[in-house]
Amino acid sequence: MEVVVASQRKVGNLLGLAVLGYLVREPMHPYELGRLLKAHGEDRSIKFTHGSLYMVFGQLAKAGFIAEHETSREGQRPERTVYALTDAGRAELKDWMRELVAEPGHEYPRFVAALSMISALHPDEVAALLRDRLDALARRVGEAEAIVAGADAHPLFLVEEEYRIALLNAEVAFVRRFLERIEGWRPQWAAFHEGER
């Protein structure tokens, strides 16, 4: 099965994927869809604002993935356009999902960028910051676990939270190992910063 890669997509913003996924259910107005994204906690997985949501709706319409379903006006309010998924949009959604599930992508997390330059800080400072990070990670794990425990939904609809918990726990394990390794590197690393403190 041939899959289109992200660089070849007409709309590559993951918010577009969420819009397509929600329009499978029923035609919606962008504002209504935005409220649903927030209500369902999708803003924990996909960053968006109402402005970016309207922009993505425009891009998807231009690409032929969604189309105006109906336009109405209530009183003095501006026209309200409801959009529906097209057949091309349904095909794009499925193809995009296949790509994201099957092919690991190269991502650029902020922490990885920081680790690539970590020697710029003194090892004592790095150790203190990493302990702060462990505390923050523990809070995030607790929040995600509370969402899963308190949800009244099929586990299929919580799988992204379970994945988030697994990633957070993996990061906790990495940070703990890194803290242990700093001790062995401390003399040479601290010497690099002689005269700064």
Image: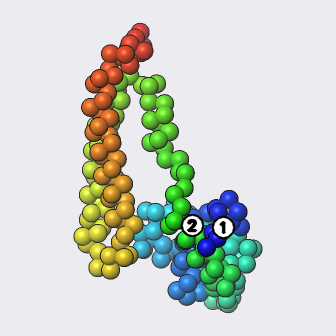
Residue 183 percent coordinates (x, y): 28, 24
Q: Is residue 40 left or right of residue 1?
A: left
Foreground pick, 47 / 153: 153
Is 187 placed above or below 175 here? above
Q: Earlier in the sequence, mark 2 or mark 1?
A: 1
Q: In the rendered image, is residue 169 in sight?
A: yes
Residue at image point 39% right, 66% down:
160
Q: In the rendered image, is residue 124 in sight?
A: no
> Given the current orientation, which residue lies at the most extreme front position?
1
Quarter of the image where one finds residue 175: top left
Is 128 placed above or below 107 here? above
Going by the numbered disc 2, the residue's amino acid type is Glu
Going by the numbered disc 1, the residue's amino acid type is Val
Quarter of the image where one finds residue 98: bottom right
Residue 116 percent coordinates (x, y): 48, 34
Q: Which residue is mark 1?
A: 4
Q: Which residue is mark 2?
A: 99
Discs 2, 1 touching: Cβ within 8 Å: yes
Residue at image point 51% right, 65% down:
102
Quarter placement of the C terminus: top left
Residue 111 percent coordinates (x, y): 44, 42
Q: How is the image coloured?
A: rainbow
Residue 23 percent coordinates (x, y): 57, 82
Determine whether the residue tagged by mark 1 lies in a helix, strand or loop. Answer: loop
Determine whether the residue tagged by mark 2 lies in a helix, strand or loop. Answer: helix
Residue at image point 38% right, 13% down:
191
Q: Residues within 10 Å of mark 2 (few under 14, many from 20)?
A: some
- Count all numbered tags in the image, as a single digit: 2
Marks 2 and 1, how far apart at CA: 7 Å
